[in-house]
Amino acid sequence: MTTSQNRVSSPSTLGIVLDRWSPRAFTDAPISWDELSSIIEAARWAPSAYNSQPWRFLVARKGTPEWETFLSWLIPFNQSWASNASALVYIASRTVMLSPSGETVPATTHEFDAGAASMLLHLQANHLGWATHAMSGFDAEAAKKGLAAPDEFKIHAAVAIGRQGPAELLPEGLRPRETPSGRAPLATMAWEGPFKAQEG
């Protein structure tokens, strides 16, 4: 049995997987471009269909000219805590790709591939002592326009990166939620054979 952050899993589960969670309390510590690059570098090695590598990472570090603009695309709730992060990373992916024959075709797995890259980013950040929190709560239209994303790109998520701080740094209403979440039992999401009726 593997335990971490009050989470319990099978003995074969890597500790870094259980250690990773999504806090909202950040200490406002600066992050250098070298440190941030070393986090994103791991995402570069994700698998993708035909090795098309559709993902893109658009970054603003706190204190740089782009910071307030990147922050402004988040919904107010997310701005209330993400403003203390060290960096914001918007994750996008290209919706088309070159086929083996050289034709431009729909990239049917671009979102799946970008998700794989995102997970490696989270795990690498955790390995290096940085906390991450991915968000869907942002104005996708404003972000796409502000990022000058070409038409064939889709913006999927924003990720706050920073040094984790105590829950007391958060607005009072968020403090009780500042704890690692659990997961549904494996049997409810994986089984041999086709979909079957699940109780409950």
Image: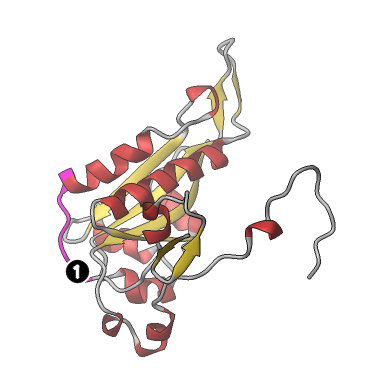
Q: Nearer the viewer, residue 68 or 10?
A: 10
The answer to whether residue 199 is left or right of residue 50 is right
x and y, in percent, of residue 101 in the image? 59, 10
Is 29 within the magenta? Answer: yes
Q: Nearer the viewer, residue 123 or 70?
A: 123
Residue for badge 1: 28
Residue at the far right in the pictured view: 197
x and y, in percent, of residue 86 in the image? 23, 61
Residue at the far top in the pictured view: 101
Span shown in magenta: 27-34
Q: Is residue 191 visible?
A: yes
Q: How is the image coloured?
A: secondary structure
Q: Name the residue located 43 percent from the left edge and 76 percent from the top edge.
A: 77
x and y, in percent, of residue 169 in the image? 26, 81
Please state which amino acid type lies under the numbered disc 1.
Asp
Q: Is residue 151 visible?
A: no
Q: Is residue 74 above or below residue 118?
A: below
Residue at the far bottom in the pictured view: 172
Q: Residues within 10 Å of mark 1 (few under 14, many from 20)?
A: some
Q: Is residue 55 above or below residue 4?
A: above
Q: Name the residue located 26 percent from the left edge and 68 percent from the top edge.
A: 164
